[in-house]
């Protein structure tokens, strides 16, 4: 069994104050670098500006030779649940209210360096978290991290919560394939076994790499005539892998390749009938087709089944089982609307995708079935080109949705900042006892000199 490796930088230490601007976003001062006596500051270690909203800080990293302390401001949102009853002599199809309420917020992970060109910046950009409740009751959050997205040094980090998502422990490297980008982790809890899925490969061709394509061999006197970078770079380098833990994340199995061309993003599910399903898209077809990877023997064998195509897009699917046993899938699309499809045969076949009158940005969504059988949708409810606000809705049947609860909002690019990209996006959800959900997401600010992503979380109460 393989044991997880600790971050070389140590832990994060928070300092908290409590003021906000009129728009609810944090406007903290520049980061203070506090040094112990005799320590010499290293250049390029200070983070210039962390802005945002609705956060409570966790985990500042102790750099070698210095304590870097980040002041973070936060406020606690209050979700108002308003029930409106209209009494008339006619039957009225009343829109459901918001059956959700935010209880608390926290930060899973942040890092004090943001310059993607800084050689000492190892974990400044954090994105695409997935969260699950482990068999021992703790929470596990996993995400990819590096100096910038697609860096060849990108790894998958993880953190546990032992107090039901109120705070998060020290982060550590869970997966790091040498000379590759590790990305898009997903989880699936099946009884006492926890599955960890991920992809790795290379997004760009530098440094150069070559090798024999699969099935090729040397011909003639020129040993380099048939060398190619095809298997090392881009879509052909991406493969789906899995590891598992039978002790709630204390140790993990060796990795195993599950599929050659499939890629994951959202968590898998265990059907009430026992099958395991993992939603996937297809790299070989340039993300133009989605499927599920299915196992009927608790993960001994996995096979890809079903096929979903849609002109509006089919990227980064997410799934949940409905009360009637059907499986619903939501798709990342590019037309600004939410699209879903359903399967009545455990993912083997799928209905034609259906467009809902709900806005959806071009980003990863999340579907999650809660203990009473209802399904929660968490996604960026916005036009294409934006990834804010992040909202949560509830449905009984996948057709009629509650009003949305806003989970988070991003900054506005150019509003007193140099950012050209601000996002609250890529959510993942798990459930605690007493109908409390924990949602995690990426909070991202992007400029030419700053590419920063942190992982945030909130506890959300599901109301009857």
Image: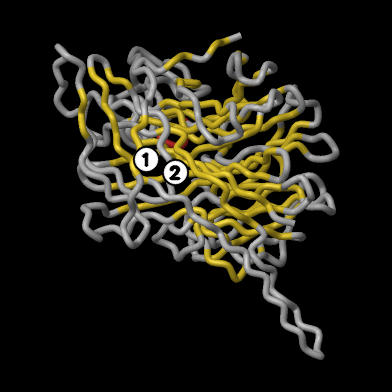
Indicate left or right for 33 with 372 as reference. Answer: left
* Residues under numbered marks 2 and 1 in contact, where contact means CB atoms less than 8 Å apart: yes
Indicate left or right for 453 with 240 as reference. Answer: left
- Residue lying farthest to the top in this orientation: 1
Residue at 80% of width from left, 31% of height from top? 296
- Can you give x and y, in whole percent of width and height, for residue 43 in the image? 14, 25
| Label ID, residue 442 | 2
Image height check: is 58 above or below 348? above
Indicate left or right for 401 with 418 as reference. Answer: right
Q: Quadrant of residue 341?
A: bottom right
Secondary structure of the residue carrying numbered label 1: strand
Q: Is residue 226 visible?
A: no
Residue at 37% of width from left, 21% of height from top? 179
Which residue is labeled 1 in the image?
453
- Residue lying farthest to the front in this orientation: 18
Q: Quick one: 440 or 290, which is closer to the camera?
A: 440
Q: Quadrant of the N terminus?
A: top right
Q: Quadrant of residue 292?
A: top right
Q: Earlier along the polypeptide chain: callout 2 or callout 1?
A: 2
Image height check: is 49 above or below 147? below
- Can you give x and y, in whole percent of width and height, for residue 268 in the image? 66, 37
Q: Is residue 404 visible?
A: yes
Residue at 50% of width from left, 57% of height from top? 380
Q: Quick one: 170 or 114, which is closer to the camera?
A: 170
- Can you give x and y, in whole percent of width and height, for residue 304 in the image? 69, 37
């Amino acid at each position: 069994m393989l044991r997880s490796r600790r971050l070389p930088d140590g832990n994060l230490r928070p300092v908290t104050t409590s003021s906000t601007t009129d728009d609810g976003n944090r406007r903290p001062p520049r980061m203070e670098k506090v040094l112990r006596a005799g320590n010499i500051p290293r250049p390029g270690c200070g983070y210039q500006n962390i802005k945002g909203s609705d956060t409570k800080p966790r985990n500042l990293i102790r750099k070698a030779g210095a304590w870097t302390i980040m002041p973070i401001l936060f406020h606690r949102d209050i979700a108002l649940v308003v029930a409106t009853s209209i009494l008339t002599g006619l039957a009225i199809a009343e829109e459901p209210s918001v059956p959700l309420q935010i209880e608390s917020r926290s930060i899973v992970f942040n890092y004090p360096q943001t310059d993607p060109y800084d050689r000492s910046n190892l974990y400044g950009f954090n994105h695409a978290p997935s969260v699950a409740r482990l068999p021992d009751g703790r929470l596990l959050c996993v995400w990819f991290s590096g100096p910038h997205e697609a860096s060849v040094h990108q790894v998958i980090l993880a953190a546990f919560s032992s107090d039901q998502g109120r705070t998060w422990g020290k982060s550590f490297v869970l997966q790091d394939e040498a000379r590759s980008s590790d990305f898009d982790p997903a989880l699936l809890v099946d009884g006492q076994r926890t599955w960890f899925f991920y992809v790795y490969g290379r997004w760009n061709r530098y440094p150069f790499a070559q090798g024999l394509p699969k099935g090729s061999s040397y011909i003639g006197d020129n040993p380099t005539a048939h060398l190619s970078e095809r298997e090392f770079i881009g879509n052909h380098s991406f493969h789906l892998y899995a590891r598992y833990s039978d002790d709630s994340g204390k140790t993990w199995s060796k990795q195993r390749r599950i599929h050659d061309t499939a890629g994951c993003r959202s968590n898998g599910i265990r059907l009430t009938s026992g099958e395991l399903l993992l939603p996937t898209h297809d790299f070989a077809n340039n993300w133009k087709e989605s499927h599920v990877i299915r196992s009927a023997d608790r993960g001994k064998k996995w096979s890809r089944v079903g096929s979903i195509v849609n002109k509006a897009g089919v990227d980064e699917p997410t799934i949940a089982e409905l009360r009637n046993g059907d499986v619903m899938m939501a798709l990342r699309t590019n037309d600004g609307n939410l699209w879903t499809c359903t399967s009545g045969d455990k993912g083997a076949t799928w209905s034609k995708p259906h467009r809902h009158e709900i806005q959806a940005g071009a980003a990863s969504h999340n579907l999650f079935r809660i203990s009473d059988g209802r399904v929660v949708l968490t996604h960026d409810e916005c036009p294409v080109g934006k990834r804010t606000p992040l909202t949560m809705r509830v449905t009984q049947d996948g057709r009629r949705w509650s009003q949305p609860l806003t989970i988070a909002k991003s900054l506005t690019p150019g509003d007193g900042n140099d950012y050209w990209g601000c996002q609250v996006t890529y959510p993942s959800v798990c459930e605690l006892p007493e109908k409390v959900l924990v949602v995690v997401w990426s909070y991202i600010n992007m400029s030419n000199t700053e590419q920063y992503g942190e992982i945030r979380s909130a506890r959300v109460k599901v109301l009857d």
